[in-house]
Image (cartoon, helix red, strand yellow):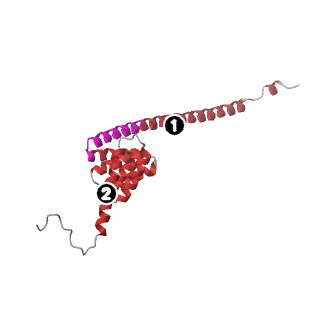
Amino acid sequence: MKSLADKRRDRRPLALLLTVAGVVLGGLVLARYDDIATGVQSLRMRGHAEMQRRGELEQRFRQGVVMLHARRYEEAAEAFHRVLQLAPRLPEAHVNMGFSLIGLAQWPAAHDFFATAIELQPEQANAYYGLAMSLEGLDDLPGAIGAMRTYIHRSGDQDRYRRKAEAAIWEWRTRLDQARRQSDLPTDAPPAAEAGAGD
C-alpha cells in the first residue's frame, strides 16, 4: 500500500513547467497577433495609397484629354507625363502623349510614343493613326501610308475618322507620285515652256 506521502507527491515541478509553457505559448500568440495586426494595418495603408494613386491617375488622364481637345498641347503633355509615371504600361496614355507631341511638332518623340502603344496593345487602332501622322511629319510618306492602312483595317467602316484617313492616304500617294515624276525628269533638260510665253 502506498503511503500518504507517496499519494501527495510533489506536483510543484509539473505546475511550474505548465506555467512556463503557458507563458511562452501566450507570448507566441500575442506576438503572432501583433504580426497579424501589423500586416492588416500595412494592407490598409497600401490599399489607401493605391486608391489615391488611381484617383490621381483618373484625374490626370481626364485633365490631359481636356487639354488635348482644347489644343493646349504643352499642358496635355504634362498631364500625360504624370499619367505615365503612375501607369507606364497604359497604351491609351502613350497614344494621347503622342497626339500631344504631334501638336507640339515633336515628330520623333510622338513616333516613339505611338510605337510603344502599339507594342503594348497591337489592337489600339488610334495608335496607328497617330503613327501615320508622326511619320508624315518625319517625311516618311510610304511609312505613313502603311500605318494609315493599318488604322483603316483595324478601325472598321463606321469609324468617324475613316474618311479623313482615306483622304490622307490619297494625298500622300499624290505627293509621292509627283516626287517620282520630278525625279524622272532629266537634270539637263531646259525648263518647260509655259503657254503664252514669248508672245
Q: Is residue 79 magenta?
A: no
What residue is at 47 percent from the left and 34 percent from the top?
Answer: 44
93 w.r.t. 44: above or below: below
Asked whether residue 56 appears in the rendered view, the answer is yes
The residue carrying mark 1 is: 39
What residue is at 31 percent from the left and 54 percent from the top?
Answer: 171
Q: Which residue sits furthest front?
A: 199
Q: Is residue 69 magenta?
A: yes
Asked whether residue 97 appears in the rendered view, the answer is no
Foreground of the two, 198 or 25: 198
Q: Return the disc, 1 or 2, that comes first in the chain's sequence.
A: 1
Q: Which residue sits furthest right?
A: 1
Q: Quadrant of the C terminus?
A: bottom left
Give the magenta range: 51-74
Disc 2 on helix, strand or loop?
helix
* Image-based side of 33 in relation to 18, left or right: left
Q: Which residue sits furthest top?
A: 4
Give residue 140's quadrant in the image. bottom left
Q: For the residue marked with disc 2, what is the amino acid?
A: Thr
Q: Which residue sits furthest bottom?
A: 188
Percent from the top left, x then y, of residue 12? 71, 30
Asked if the residue under mark 2 is in contact with the one under mark 1, i.e. CB atoms within 8 Å, the reply is: no
Percent from the top left, x then y, of residue 166? 35, 49
Give residue 63's quadrant in the image. top left
Label placed on residue 63:
none
Disc 1 on helix, strand or loop?
helix
* Image-based side of 182 in relation to 145, left or right: left
Label placed on residue 174:
2
Q: Residues within 10 Å of mark 2 (few under 14, many from 20)?
A: few
